[in-house]
Image (cartoon, helix red, strand yellow):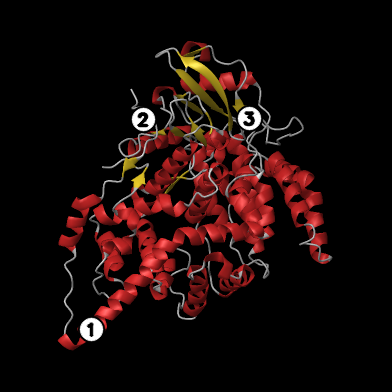
Amino acid sequence: MDRVCAPARMPLGIGTQAMRHLNRTFEPRSVVGRSSTRRTSRRVVRTEARTTTKVSDMNSQMKDMRAQMEEDEQLSSLMRGLRGQGINEDDFASTTTQMRLIDFDQGDAIDSLPLDYDPDAIAAYWSKRPAAVTQRVFQLLGVSGWFITSIVGDILFKRVKQNEVLRAQQLRDIVTSLGPAYIKLGQALSIRPDILSPAAMNELQKLCDKVPAYDNAIAMRTIEAELGRPPHEIYKDLSPNPIAAASLGQVYKGILRATGEEVAVKVQRPFVLETVTVDLFVIRKLGFALRDVPQVTTDVVALLDEWAARFFEELDYVREGRNATRFAAQMKDDLPQVKVPKTYPDFTTRRVLTQEWLYGEKLSQSQAADTGDLVKVGVICYLKQLLETGFFHADPHPGNLIRTPDGRLAVLDYGLMTEISDDIKYGMIEAIAHLINRDYEAIVDDFVTLEFIPEGVDLKPILPVLAKVFDQALEGGGAKNINFQALAADLAQITFDYPFRIPPYFALIIRAIAVLEGIALVGDPEFALVDEAYPYLSKRLLTDDHPRLRAALKYMVYGKEQVHSVNIQSTLGQHSVNTQSTFAAH
């Protein structure tokens, strides 16, 4: 039986033992030359005061910055989009929505189309079927031709900015009707501020992944074909109609005859593989053509391939079930407050997924007194994925975070997960240490490690520009001293002058944290992410023996000048020794 644990405040568990371990690891450095002692002492105090100021003031600075950002229309729109506050969370689409899929008899499609993303195999398959491709192209043009004409008109008559929101709204409706590939691509773009404007992001956030349900008889035949038995022999009291319908499949509720447990049964929509692959084939052809257009600086083909490889994983329900099981195992010891639905592998195939039915309410809509505590559990949960397990839930939106009746945080939908390498995990912690100490030379190198800048780029010219941006953002006094228009202009200039990009994993991180913050701010306007994140970061630094984390801790203690700080508590913050957290101690 799963351990039930209501959210409670538990000590972080760093304390005296970790401090002794720290002192054994880093003995104070002696300063060579007696005459330099006084000068070095002054330097230590100065370095320590600077670092202490940054840690202790970070909370209030972030609150001030958030308040000023909310006053700026563009930035406020961006934050609403990242927090998922515009997402349509209905269980079904509007009755006026019609999704257009390929519906033709290609009996060998499943046998011939690749089940993992392989653009060459997809191209080879569809190149032999020009009639089907033509059918799909006419579908696409019939739905979007007028929209393309409108965009061209906006460009010619210089009305792009004026019609930006209108076009985003129209694009959202078009994308919904074009099927799974376009819906998922639109959702992926809706969290990419480096590709879309805040207004466009906010509109695409409203993109509904819910579509009209397909014929129940087809769903029942799919269950029988996949599981080898009629549905009534496997489930009893299976709902006559789906509980919810999405672009890839629809969900029924039933009872598993083998165990008597309530389950959710997700059944994949027919013709999904065919439609998705032909769409990718067409978009990829367009991407190759755009490479000859000088005004298009983005490599559309590379961007599409990167996204499509991960999207294909969502088509495999066996993988989704395994992802959930792996995620649950990683969370159960440290975070028993996190609930993951159990998967039944004997009743799961590539196109049918059987999982435990969970009762609860969306965390974003909950009025329970412990909602704030569950948000904090969510913050630690995502930090643990990001900095420890490296197995990241890549579909963080309010509809996937549920408060269960026993007061736990249920995380749903494991079709899309991201693996974060050790190099990225440790690189993020190193970057935090460098940022606190304003070591901008090291931060520029961190951008390469974290894949914001490709290797081989000359970093010297970018250093003074980034130093200006970070100095302004970290200056004492909070957001009132920041000129956001100038800051945005500086950042825009950096992205224009240098091959800066937001890695896909980082866009998901921003989205996950923004969603949790958005939920928390509804109940607690004073919520500060630093208060919840810093204890975890401190614990990681103080208890992990990996050489790179030991080096990061050493940097935090000694600073760039490698001189011993007399007060480690000031360096790591009061949180590190005396704090209350929702994190369960090892």
Residue shown at the point (41%, 72%) measured from the top left = 438
> In this rendering, which labeled residue sits more in front, label 2 or label 3?
2
Query: Residue 117: x percent and y percent?
Result: 50, 46
> In this rendering, which labeled residue sits more in front, label 1 or label 2?
1
**The disc labelled 2 sits on which kind of residue?**
Cys
Q: CA distance from mark 1 to mark 2?
A: 54 Å
Q: Residue furthest bottom?
A: 35
For the residue pair 506 and 215, the one nearer the viewer reads as 506
Disc 1 marks which residue?
38
Contact between labelled residues 2 and 1, with CB atoms less than 8 Å apart? no
Q: Secondary structure at mark 1?
A: helix
Q: Secondary structure at mark 3?
A: loop
Q: CA distance from mark 3 to mark 1?
A: 69 Å
Q: Is residue 140 visible?
A: yes
Disc 3 marks which residue?
91
Disc 2 marks which residue?
5
Q: Quadrant of residue 361?
A: top right
Q: Secondary structure at mark 2?
A: loop
Is residue 145 positioned above or below 4 on the image? Answer: below
